[in-house]
Amino acid sequence: MIVVLKSRHILYGVTLLLMMVSATGCGRIISYYTRPLLDDLNRSLMRQKDVVLAEQGTPAFLMLLDGLIQHSPEDKSLLLSGAKAYSAYTSAFVGEKNPERNKILAGKAKEYAFRAFSLNNREFSKAKDKPHPEFVALLPSLRKKDVPYLYYAATCWAGWIQANSESLDAIADLPKVESLIKRAIELDESFYYGASHTFMGVLLTIRPPSLGGRLDEARKHFERGVKLGQGKFLPAYVLYARHYAKPTYKENLFYDLLDKALDSPVDEVSELILINTLARRQAGDLIDNARNEEYFK
């Protein structure tokens, strides 16, 4: 607990320092000194194996990002960092535990992702609210360099839809999200260890077949995501098991995927340590729940 408190105090101290510098009008100092600091803090967070430390320290990191974005509202790299951080924190530590907070934080992730994408491609800001046929007209103009903005706009959008799943208007945006991810796969299917394929697999399974769910196609995307992840990106195993193997009652596949997640090292890639640690914990929970509920009996 002492370590946790120290980590939080350091981040709060950095945030306060930046607020003080900003108040003096020294914008160049912020731009020059905070970028390496921000990168180091992000790397440190992603390399963290202690999930409690990460959960309790991240809010201060989010406050730091908010302050930097407020100071530089058209810095698309900062906005993208904010989108990724808010999305990751919300999905890992908030989710269904606190629906109202989930809505707020998922909304912030979506806002930052949309602003970043709009700065990277001015046409997106015009197209995002248009009907689907007009929206997809934007996609051919996107190139491989746009994939990070494209991917995080889609995933943050999906997180916001999930947080507002009682809204028919929100759910109506799912085809747009699917179109973005499809384009990301076309441009660079290996981006972030094949995560676009895994995400597409989830999208194709969260709706019943009568509403556009396509289980066979989802399975192909999950398999491709696992292959591109090369055993290093453990969420690919967990999401494949949760969203395909379990609902289709494929018991052997379910346990095989989760056993692979549990048996794989979490620290083979430093930037994936926290993500893989969380995925391994989720794998254990899925196995325990399936056995306790006698799901496959």
Image (cartoon, rainbow, N blue to C red):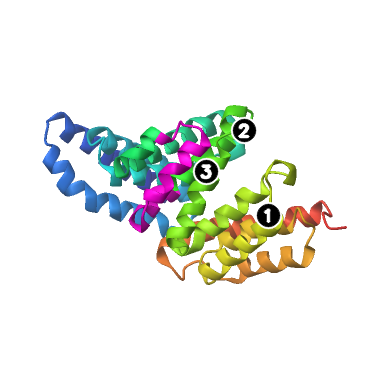
How many angstroms separate mark 3 from mark 1 (CA)? 21 Å
Q: Quadrant of residue 27?
A: top left
**Front-most of 91 and 80?**
80
Q: Which residue is mark 3?
A: 177
Quick one: label 3 or label 1, which is nearer the N terminus?
A: 3
Mark 2 or mark 3, whichever is nearer to me: 3
**Extreme residue in the right direction:** 297
Report whether 194 appears left or right of 58: right
Quick one: label 1 or label 2, which is nearer the N terminus?
A: 2
The amino acid type found where label 2 is placed reads Ser
State if disc 3 and disc 2 touch (CB < 8 Å): no
Report whether 279 appears left or right of 88: right
Q: Is residue 38 visible?
A: yes
Local packing at callout 1 (Cα closer than 10 Å; few below 14, some 14-19, many 20+) is some
Report whether 259 appears left or right of 131: right
Determine whether the residue tagged by mark 3 lies in a helix, strand or loop: helix
The amino acid type found where label 1 is placed reads Arg
The amino acid type found where label 3 is placed reads Val
Which numbered marker is on residue 77? none
Q: Quadrant of residue 208?
A: top right
Q: Which residue is mark 2?
A: 165
The stretch of residues the image draws in magenta is 127-151
Q: Which residue is mark 1?
A: 242
Please provide percent x and percent y for residue 17. 21, 38
Determine whether the residue tagged by mark 2 lies in a helix, strand or loop: loop
How many angstroms separate mark 2 from mark 3 (CA)? 14 Å
